[in-house]
Amino acid sequence: MAEPKQERAVRTRELILYAAAEIFDECGYSGASISKIMDRAQVTQGGMYFHFKSKRSLAQAVLAHQQEFVNFSGGTNGLQKLVDLTFFLARELQNNVLFRASVRLAVEQGEFGGHDDTAYQEWVTEFRALLNEASELGELQADVDEAEFANVLVGAYSGIQVFSNISSGRADLPERIVSMWRYLLPAVATPQTRARLSFPADAQRMAA
């Protein structure tokens, strides 16, 4: 039985989006081209332009769905869940090309006329929600402003992952996240909370 037209269109769009992510991740926005993406997706020009009118529209589509490319369902709460999320994102940056490409495009968006901080603000919102939860659980020191620290953490994490990518292709990113938390946790978490927080065993070995 022939594949329904709507299902085929959805599948083609997903193939193009994934191929675009691979090319953007490998080449950056400037080095990517529609022809490279078409070759990687194995679609015709007509199939490409039916879904995406330009390289810029493809980049915007990858960037717009950054949070949809990760699926974190940690079993903890509060500050431990936030710590776990940062290590989960480090692994996703190492292994998930869709997420990795969206992060690269967020950094490079000036190359295609973008000045949109939506992707960053979405992570600020996510981190702030976990910090609010941590505060309700009594895990944060009294002078911590959850909104302010969420912004600081997203900025620090963004810079750390860029530095790690340049230095090691993100191979050492979990180690760098351990270092980040070792310096940040004493400033925000109560001593009792710090005593029970844990890092992934493999990241701790790297940082030892």
Image: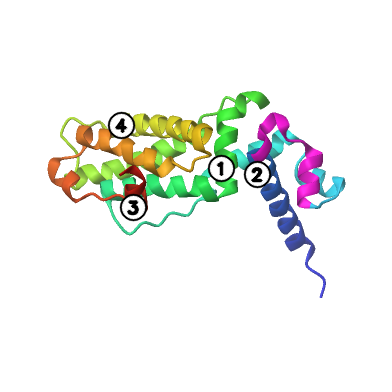
- Quick one: label 4, few (<14), some, or many (20+) residues within 10 Å? some
The answer to whether mark 3 and mark 1 are in CB contact below 8 A is no
Residue at mark 4 to residue at mark 2: CA–CA distance:
31 Å
Q: Residue furthest bottom?
A: 1
Closer to the observer: label 3 or label 1?
Answer: 3
Horizontally, residue 39 falls left or right of residue 18, namely right
Picture disc at residue 100: 1
Residue extent of the magenta highlight: 26-41
**What amino acid does circle 2 point to?**
Ala
The C terminus - image quarter? top left
The answer to whether mark 4 and mark 2 are in CB contact below 8 A is no
The answer to whether mark 2 and mark 1 are in CB contact below 8 A is yes
- Secondary structure at badge 4 equals helix
Find disc 3 in the rendering and name its residue. 200
Residue at mark 3 to residue at mark 2: CA–CA distance:
28 Å
Horizontally, residue 164 falls left or right of residue 192, namely right
The answer to whether mark 4 and mark 3 are in CB contact below 8 A is no
- What main secondary structure does the magenta stretch of the protein show? helix
